Image (cartoon, rainbow, N blue to C red):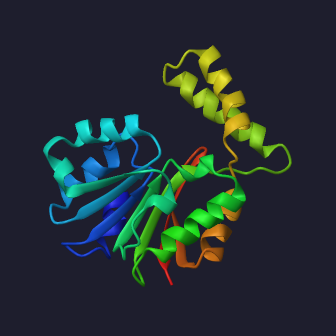
Amino acid sequence: MAGLLLAEHVPATGRVLVLGAGGGLELRAFATRHPGWRFDGVDPSPEMIGQARTTLGALADRVAFHEGYIDDAPDGPFDGAACLLTLHFLDRAERLRTLRQIRRRLAKGAPLVVAHHSFPQADGQKDVWLRRNADLLASAGVPPAQAEKGIDTMKERLPALSPEEDEALQRDAGFGGVQLFYAAFTFKGWVAYRR
């Protein structure tokens, strides 16, 4: 989905920023479908960058890796950007700063695709959605004790926001046309465009 949304605006020989390049799965998917794209992958973990290189194999020569965070990314301009399963680790202020820094590196009109945990936070809804997430994991074969522990881990480590808050931050960062394209329990995904 992310690759399709990027491809609506990224040219055939475009340059794409991938923040939170992790193990390289999205880079491999993008590179396989779009042989003319080049990438800058940013991740704070040298181990994860190494895993991404392995995952990419021969495709790795189309990726420039940068160890660190958004401030360690090149200035661009990029034709598009993706930030998958990353923003939910950042508190509101750092998330807004990161979104602004991504925007600064994008060409006008370029798409940004984000996906991460985002679910209602008010009136006990946080607990309801975390319970649902744990139940989903257990129904997929995760041991119930491990799924339960996941609730506490998410409460302690993920400063998740509500979908409304996430959309507002994207607009505050200077993106327009913010559209929800994916929703599955606690996960949400949006595409937005640099104004």
Q: Quadrant of residue 139?
A: top right
Say left or right for 58 vs 86. left
Relative side of 104 to 37, left or right: right
| Residue 73 image point, x, y percent | 42, 62
Q: Which of 140 and 153 is in front in this view?
A: 153
| Quadrant of res 128 | top right
Near-viewer residue (162 or 195): 195
**Image point (66%, 59%), residue name:** 94
Residue 182 visible in the picture:
no
Name which residue lies at 82% across and 51% down. Answer: 122
Left or right, residue 169 beside residue 137: right
Tell me what residue is drawn at x 42 percent, y 84 percent: 108
Q: Where is residue 101 in the image (x, y as percent from the top left)?
A: 53, 69
Q: Quadrant of the N terminus?
A: bottom left
Locate residue 4, reporting x and y percent: 31, 63
- Residue 47 in the image: above or below residue 98: above
Q: Residue at 69% across / 53% down in the picture?
A: 91
**Can see residue 91?**
yes
Seen from the viewer's position, the closer of residues 144 and 139 is: 144
Residue 134, image x, y percentages: 63, 29
| 91 left or right of 108 in image | right
Q: Which of 64 and 113 is in front in this view?
A: 64
Q: Which residue lies furthest to the right in this view?
A: 123
